[in-house]
Image (spheres, coloured by chain):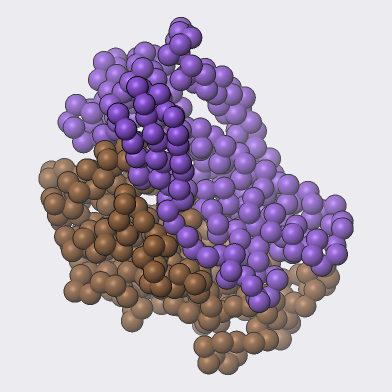
Chain colours: A purple, B brown
Amino acid sequence: MGTVIVDPVTRIEGHLKITTEVVNGVVTDAHASGTMARGLESLLIGRDTRDAPYVTERVCGVCFGSHGWCSSLAVEAAHGTTELPALARIMRNLIVGACFLHDHPLHFYHLSALDYLDLATLVNYAGTDTYINKIKQLIIDNDAAPLLPRYEPDGFSINDLDTVASAVGHYLDALVMQVKAKRMSALFSGKQPHQASIVPGGVTYLPTAEQIAEFRTMLVEQTDFINNVYIADVVALGTGPICLWQPLTWG
Amino acid sequence: MDKEKENFIHGVFIDRRSFLKMTAAAAAALGLGSLSWPDSAEAAGKPAVLWLHGQECTGCTESVLSALDPDPRDVILDVVSIRYHETIMAASGYVAEEALEATILEGNYVLVMEGSIPNADDRYLYVAGKPLRITFLEAAQNAAAIIAIGACATYGGINGATVTRGLGVSDLVSGKPIVNLPGCPLKPTWFYGTLLYYLNNGTLPPLDSDLRPLAYFSRKVHQDCPRRFNFMQKNFLTDWNDPAQEGYCLFLKGCKGRWTRSDCSLTLWNEGANTCIKSNAPCAGCTEAVFYDGFSPLYTNGVIKGGMIP
């Protein structure tokens, strides 16, 4: 088969190209190339150190929070700060923790799951979910962008109707949950994506009791989603590609 | 000045509560009655959208998908036909390229540009084996209108300051309807409001000299700042740890609100959750053309570049 190139690799943050050498259906060599450069590292040379978290945060707009947080830790270490006030540490953990609630399910559902699902299966859907019926109609009308077209489904694709319908339903639920997780983080950090309140030395903001109460309420909803939907799907779908040589029963 | 006058935006009086209704308010500020998608567009199929990613962090896509009104599920399935969007489309590789090429040939789509185009050297950004600059110019050629979103795609933003010398859309394309929605990232209301206006009227909303919609960018953050009283009293925050300075003006901490046009102080972020200044952090001026380099260092106003004097 020779050289197989996938460029662009989609559903990632940034721009990626994968080159593989295939001999008799077996990959013998592979290269990954990041095809974009911004020069954010060299931009920071000679700048005020307090700008570093602001710029570094913008490395990624999907896993925001993490980069600004780590850059703040690096600036603090460079200035010889060994310990933060407990309140600042807790606030940062809540801000970044809410970001984790946003981007881990987002990576699983919105950036990965579509690779394993044969969405065309949904034309046989007979359930009542409004949004899945909408997708069904779009597939019939040949207007299902951006969910279709895609690479031809292969042995790795799940085409069991119940599993696909359930996974797509959760894909759509997670789309709403990620909005709420961003709001959770923004309550303490100004805005999301790209928070404002984590600065070298601590956190600028002390939230109101009202905001803490809202954060807590939203956390309950998120925890419920993680425990009852997300983890179950990770266990079920995370083992998907293995089915080629180790058949699994779905649904 | 009475309360009503403070909320005077582009010839329309809007009370504060309706501002908080996010997209509905975004539509109202642009003179649209309600959040409605035009019937004509529905009859002719969903309007096609091409969404290209230059040098970017995907934060603007994330921000567009951080509103509950409109529901993100409706946006993806009902509102527009997103033919190409590297972060959400199922296709990869040649299937993605074919979708892009087919839509460009079809023409008459809305081109959304996120991220800058490197000016120093094309090799800073290649997609599908060719410089993104070339792909972008081809897509811009056949577009009905171009919406540049985020600081990078509008004026270069942070990438404009790096060795790659990233450029915004209006630096590369002329003779097309272009609207700039800057910000790092942009606010979802600006995107939905502008898109709605375009789909309803077939033209872009009234723009300022930097091609930003007047409805969102006619007033400075400073003018509507909740800490304006403390600014006038010369109460400037110098120490975040001092409880006596709570609510003080952040000017000495580098706030760029005096030079920054945006409705952040009025409509807040994440559906009214908070905003930079409200969370005690200085405005970074991310909606201005001089951002980032002209406003750096961000956390002090001791040295101000770009000839601006407080």
In the image, residue B205 sits, relative to residue A109, either above or below, namely: below
- For this view, does B125 lie left or right of residue B49? right
Total tally of numbered discs in the picture:
0
Residue at the image position 52 percent from the left and 41 percent from the top: A178
Residue at the image position 43 percent from the left and 66 percent from the top: B152
Q: Nearer the viewer, residue A213 or A232?
A: A232
Residue B250, quarter of the rendered image: bottom right
In the image, residue B284 sits, relative to residue B68, either above or below, namely: below
- For this view, does B288 lie left or right of residue A130? right
Q: Nearer the viewer, residue B94 or A200?
A: B94
Q: Nearer the viewer, residue B66 or B21?
A: B66
Residue B216, quarter of the rendered image: bottom left
- For this view, does B120 lie left or right of residue B101? right
In the image, residue B207 sits, relative to residue B97, either above or below, namely: below
- Evaluate whether residue B242 shows in this view: yes
Q: Nearer the viewer, residue A195 or A30?
A: A30
Residue at the image position 26 percent from the left and 58 percent from the top: B135
Residue A31, given in percent of the width and then of the height, sits at 46, 41
Residue B211, given in percent of the width and then of the height, sits at 32, 75
Residue B310, given in percent of the width and then of the height, sits at 60, 90
- Evaluate whether residue A164 shows in this view: no
Residue at the image position 27 percent from the left and 40 percent from the top: B94
Residue B147, given in percent of the width and then of the height, sits at 31, 63
In the image, residue B220 sits, relative to residue A75, either above or below, namely: below
